[in-house]
Structures are given as C-alpha cells and as structure tokens.
Image (cartoon, rainbow, N blue to C red):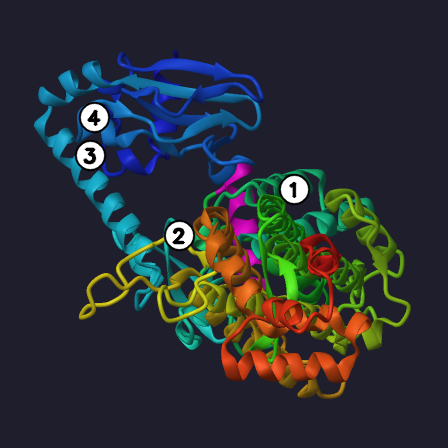
Amino acid sequence: MESQSVIDCLEKVELFQGLTTQELSIFVNLASQKILKKGDMLFRGHDVSDTLYVIENGSVQLFDERTEPHQSLTVFSHYEFIGETILIAPPHQHHLSARALSPVTLITFERDTLLAALSEHGKIALQISATISQIIIRRMQYANNRYENIATLYQASGQRNERDLLGDKQVPQTAYYGIQTLRALENFDISGITLNFYPDFICGLAKVKKAAALANFELGNLSEEIKTAICQACDEITLGALHNHFIVDMIQGGAGTSTNMNINEVVANRALEIMGRPLGDYQYCHPNNHVNCSQSTNDAYPTAIKVALMDANEKLLQVINRLVVCLEDKALEFQHVLKMGRTQLQDAVPMTLGQSFKAFASSLKNELLRLNTSSAQFLEVNMGGTAIGTGINAAPIYRERVVHHLSDITRRNIRLADDLIEATHDTGALVMYSSALKQLAVKLSKICNDLRLLSSGPRAGLNEINLPPMQPGSSIMPGKVNPVIPEVVNQIAFKVIGNDLTVTLAAEAGQLELNVMEPVMVESVFESIEILKSGMDTLATRCITGITANQSVCEHNVKSSIGIVTALNPHLGYDISTALAKEALSTGNSVYDLVLEKQLMSKEKLDEVLSPENMVQ
C-alpha cells in the first residue's frame, strides 16, 4: 500500500485522532489492504476477533445471523473502524457478523503486530488507549438512553461553529446533526424517547429524502454530485447507519420541524463526507437548500410517517401470524380434551379445550385484515404540497416525480392525494390505524384474561390448564407462581388503549391548515406497535407454547356439571330439564344418574345424547 494513502486515511479516523503525521507513519508498514465485493463476508459470528479493520471506502453492515430474518444492527462507512477492542482485550469470538454492502476497501492491522509496535511507542499507545476508553464511555452512556445532553457523547472530539436564524452555536465536531437539531435537543427534553427508538421512522425519513433528491435532480435543482451523495447517505441510513445521531425527542413542538431538520442535517453532513468535505461545510450541501429542496416539514414529515408505518405494520403482521400459529398448534394438541364452556362465569355447555384455543387464533386472524385495511390509507400522501398544500416553492411537475420515485424506493403503489390542502391537515389515517391497534390490544387482553382464569388455582381455582412457570410469584408465600406473561400483556393492552385516546384527542386538536399535534400521535402509534410486537412475541414463546392441559380436571368438571342438562332439552323438554338441574344442585347427584333413576331415558340413548361428539359439534 502507498504510505501517503494510508496516512491520509488514518488522519480522518477517530481512533488515531491527535497523532501527528510522523506518528501515523509507524502504522504504514503494519497495514494491509483487503478488498471485498458487494455481499462478501468480512467475518461471521464465532470467528476469532484478532484484526482491526479501518474502512477506506464503501459500507459494511453489522448484523445478527442468529435471528430470522437477520437483524441489521448498524452500518459502518468510510473512515470508521471495527474491532478496536483487540487492543485492550485478548482475542475473542465475534458475536455478530459483518458483510460488504458495496465494494469495500479496508486497511487492516493484525493484533499481534499492532500491539508489538505500540509497545515500542508508549506515547502513541497511551493516546490510542485513551481514545478507545472515550469511545467505550460514549457507548455505555448511549446504552442508558437517558442523559442530559447527548452532545456529551462527543465531548472529546472538538467543536464546530454553525449558524442559524437565532445566532451561532457550537456543535460537536463528529456529530452528523447540526445546530437546529441541537436547539431541539435543548428545547424538548420531554419523554426521553428519541427518534432512534424507532428505526422504521428514521428509514421512512431517509426514503422520502432520497425520493426528493432524485426528483430535484431531474428538475435541475441539484447537481449530479450532490444528488448522488444524498442518495448514498439515505441508503446508508436506511440500512441502519448513523441512527444514534437522530436525537430529537419524539414529542416536540413545531409540528415535526425538529425531526425534519434532524434528518436534513444528518443527510447533509454525511453527503458532505462522501463528497470529501468536512462536516458543517454547508456551501457544498446544505440541509435546507439541497436536502430539503422543494419540501416543507408539512409534507415530508407526514409522508415519512406513512412510509414508516407501512413498514412497521408489515413487521407487526408477522408477529401476529407467529402467535396465531402457536395458538393453532395448541388447538390441535387439545382437540380431544373435553371441558365445560362458560358464560358469565357460570357453567354453560361442554366444548373442547382445542376449540377455545382455535377461537383465540381466529380472533387474532380477523385483526390481520383490519390492520391491512387501515394501513392501506398510508399509500395516499401529500408530498409536493409543501407548506399548506398549495405547492409553494416546488415546481408543479415535482409532486408527480417525487411520488413516482418514492413508489420505486418503497416498492409500494404510493399515490398523491386528490386535495393536497385537505391532506396536509388531515390525520384520519392515523386515527383509523390507531383504532385498529386498540382493537388488537383489546382482543389480546381478553385472551390473557381467559388464560389467567383457566389456569387459576392450582387447588382453589379452575386449574384446567397449566401455564409454564416463569418465576417465583411471591416474596412471602412459598411455592406461589403467578401468570406473569398474560399479566404483562394485559398491561400492554391498557397502554395501547390509552395511546389511542391520545391519538384521538390530538387529531381533534388540529386547527386550520395544519395539525401541529402530529408528533404525539406518531409517538403514540409507534409505541403501540413496538410494545404489541414485544408482548405478542413474549406471549407466544414464553407462555402459549408451554401450556399443558389438566385433562382429568376438565373431564371431572364436565361430568359433575349441570350444564350437560342443556343437551337434554330437545328430548325431555325445558321444564323437566330445569327440574333435573334444580334437583342435581340441591342433592349433589349428577344429572346423568337422575335421568336413569327416574327412567326418563335409556342408558344407551342417554350415552348417545351426552357423547362428546354430539355435545361439542
């Protein structure tokens, strides 16, 4: 490798910050070059970690192969590095895998040779160790997800000056966000739930910005260089890169302006980096003039919401389907277990335990259609309407172009609203979708209520099923085990129901040409989706799959119940059946024995009438 190219690259890498050109030169002879084609693996989980990788060009995705589908965790781009812990810890196995998302050129350093060189240069080793320590501290702080000022993540990296309408402000040098995002951070320390809690939302914003860049390039508003850089930045964000720079609180004033500026600034700064310019050098790619060209928050923000919610809905449907399959498996397993059905918590007529679980599955299946119907409204967007729907500052042809590109990017049949002024202030799609989430939550809560009742006891309750024990149930009562998984899903349902009320009130609060309450609606809907997904996964894997039937209890309840007298109505009449039920209750005798004792039916006929097949079908 050429010495100068190695030094030029390392000068831009945070791990080597503070080192002089002469100090960097000691790494030249230690460096090797590795080139990957798109799709090539850099390493896999369980490979030994003994190499430091510095990305000179291209993008590398870090993902978890243990999940299905594979979970994308983040994307590293040029001048970023992977594997720095080899300098402070012995070789260990990777837990994750990494692959090239594009052609990649890497500068690599083997652990043993790198450590040997650093042992001869104590000052350099100390400087790099200090930087690694700062990086680890940042990551630990970030993992907490709650801190007074996210800018402290970059406290060791210097500052850059940025200016806006209100004046100048210092922004962390390595931050991809800019001054307006920083102001939003200071103004809206509200919930602690920031944009990066919801990756689908960030990806939706990036897709909208890419579509806008492509449309603006076709209309001559952007140069090819700027368009290409913006599109690459948006693609990287969609794959998971830079999500930790989306720091604005989900609940904010300004009708989403802070969110829009967060994506504008991150895309602009990443585009500048791709173009070989320093962060903040906005004359070459400006958050407003270029990334936000032909747009307003009032069309870009709601469009991104809809794009994101379509993606989030697909993931939600997958989780519902998995839960339905678990319930159907139990329905098949319990199809021959006879039990008493109950209405108003009183004995009704016999059924099978399998029929109960089949009904649970059918109930949730109905919600798949309802959610699909509700989410279909998200295909209609107001992109190109700009501020209030009149399309000011955007060419008339822009709206058709941007929607066309957005359809290609999302692979959905996105269409432009007929009335952009109405579409700019209307939040009806969010109200309808939130209502569908609420109905799903209500059904889940009902299922969990039933599971808790059926498993109640074990001696003084129904005790017809056993839920898998998850944890000791009491700090004072030995041997007690509680239905903790259904309980937590009940609580999730209550939260979703409350979120739906928030969405309703916020939609009603819209005024004139814009609903400024949209941020709290968005936060509420995304929170509902995420906790429903987590709750249903937990319910399926930690409860439903482990349920067993107490078949003897179920059968005893059927035989001793007066509910079977209902099956005798067509043969003995209502009055005689009522008298039998009353006598069975007062004497403790079974209905079966009383019928034979009074010679109301032959034993053969009675057995035929009361056979499980006749009573449950």
Image quarter hosting the C terminus: bottom right
Residue type highlighted by circle 2: Pro
Disc 2 to disc 4, how far (Cα)? 61 Å
Q: Earlier in the sequence, mark 4 or mark 3?
A: 4
Q: Which percent across, then down, holds residue 31?
A: 31, 15
Q: Which mark is residue 23?
A: 4
Residue 269 falls inside the magenta stretch: yes
Q: Position of residue 478 (x, y in %)?
A: 19, 64
Taking depth in this image into account, of 212 and 246 the one nearest to the observer is 246
Q: Read off the residue under disc 1.
A: 231
Q: Counting other residues with Cα less than 10 Å from the Cα at mark 1, is it few (<14), some (14-19), or many (20 or more)?
A: many
Judging by the rendered image, the residue that carries numbered circle 2 is: 468
Q: What distance separates the C-alpha of mark 4 from that of mark 3?
A: 12 Å
Q: Which three-letter amino acid code belongs to the residue tagged 4?
A: Glu
Q: Confirm or deny contact between disc 1 and disc 4 (CB under 8 A).
A: no
Q: Earlier in the sequence, mark 1 or mark 3?
A: 3
Tell me what residue is drawn at x 82 percent, y 68 percent. Answer: 391
Q: Main secondary structure of the magenta part?
A: helix
